[in-house]
Image (cartoon, rainbow, N blue to C red):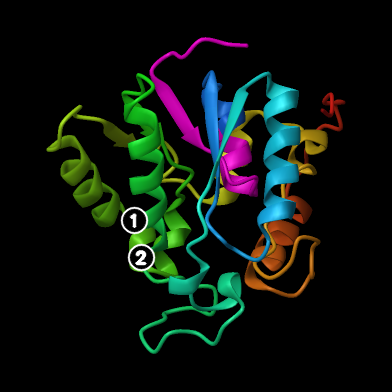
């Protein structure tokens, strides 16, 4: 069991949060099951990544599926959706849940795996949104801060900077629609493109 260094990584098990875990090496991470269809697959990935990097992983489960829309919720996209996987205010929801969980456990900084290209698909993936949400959270009791170290990087640049090897990244899971990869959704397509486009060492990582 590790002790907290004041940072908490929001670890979804996706390729971006996996690479950020390798880059930042926080002592604690949090996986949130908020009622998304691929939650079981994401959790398996987060568990494997945390074990390989010796990060303490906590789990928060709260079923918010009733307010979801799009691929992640298994419903038609909302009329405001900029992309098929868009879940209304999802990142704001996840930050609020993680911040509320973390503030009671001595967390001072919440690490987010947002990358530069996220903002091309939805506003809550932009630098402006992260800055606004950081200010909102910091203005409240506890003054917790948000940090998105990869906000200026693409996924490929983050992977290269992290030094993560292919065996670690292959634990990651990015499907939007099921607990096993569908290989067709935007998440699966992105992960395949990133992994196929990089020359990475095949150093063994220890599974859980």
Q: Nearer the viewer, residue 98 or 55?
A: 98
Please name the residue that numbered disc 1 is placed on. Answer: 92
Verify whether residue 13 appears in magenta: yes
Furthest residue toward left: 139
Indicate the position of residue 36 as horizontal and vertical percent values.
59, 63
Q: Is residue 30 left or right of residue 97?
A: right
Residue at screen point 52% across, 68% down: 65
Q: Quadrant of residue 205?
A: top right
Q: Which residue is mark 2?
A: 89
Q: Which residues are magenta?
A: 1-20
Q: Position of residue 113 (x, y in %)?
A: 49, 44
| Crowd class of label 1 (few under 14; some 14 to 19; many from 20; radius 10 Å) | some
Q: Point out which mark residue 102 bears.
A: none
- 165 up-or-down from 197: above or below: above
The vertical placement of 50 against 150, above or below, is above
Would residue 183 be counted in the magenta stretch? no
The one nearer the camera, 88 or 194, is 88
Task: Give the Cα distance between marks 2 and 1.
Answer: 5 Å
CB within 8 Å, label 2 to label 1: yes
Instruction: Find numbered disc 1 in the image and state the secondary structure of the residue it sits on.
Output: helix
Can you tell which quarter of the image residue 193 is in? bottom right
| Place of residue 150 in the rendered image (x, y in percent of width and height, measured from the top left) | 45, 41
SS class of the residue under badge 2?
A: loop
Task: Give the position of the N terminus as an image quadrant.
Answer: top right
> How many numbered markers are drawn?
2
Q: Residue at x 78, y 55 (%)?
A: 196
Q: Residues within 10 Å of mark 2 (few under 14, many from 20)?
A: few
At a point 15% along the width and 31% down the height, the residue shown is 141
Quadrant of the drawing holding the C terminus: top right
At x 14%, y 37%, the residue is 140
**Observer-nearest residue: 61 or 85?**
61
């Amino acid at each position: 069991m590790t002790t907290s260094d004041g940072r908490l990584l929001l670890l979804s098990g996706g390729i971006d949060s996996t690479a950020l875990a390798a880059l930042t090496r926080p002592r604690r991470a949090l996986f949130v099951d908020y009622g998304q269809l691929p939650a079981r697959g994401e959790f398996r990935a987060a568990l494997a990544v945390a074990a390989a990097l010796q990060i303490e992983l906590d789990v928060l489960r709260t079923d918010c599926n009733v307010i979801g829309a799009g691929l992640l919720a298994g419903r038609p996209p909302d009329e405001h959706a900029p992309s098929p996987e868009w879940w209304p205010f999802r990142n704001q929801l996840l930050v609020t849940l993680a911040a509320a969980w973390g503030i009671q456990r001595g967390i001072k900084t919440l690490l987010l795996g947002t990358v530069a290209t996220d903002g091309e698909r939805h506003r809550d993936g932009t630098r402006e949104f992260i800055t606004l949400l950081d200010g909102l959270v910091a203005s409240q009791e506890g003054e917790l801060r948000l940090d998105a170290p990869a906000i200026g990087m693409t996924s490929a640049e983050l992977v290269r900077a992290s030094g993560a090897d292919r065996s670690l990244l292959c634990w990651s899971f990015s499907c939007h629609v099921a607990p096993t990869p569908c290989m067709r959704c935007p998440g699966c397509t992105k992960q395949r493109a990133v992994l196929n486009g990089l020359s990475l060492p095949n150093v063994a990582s220890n599974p859980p």
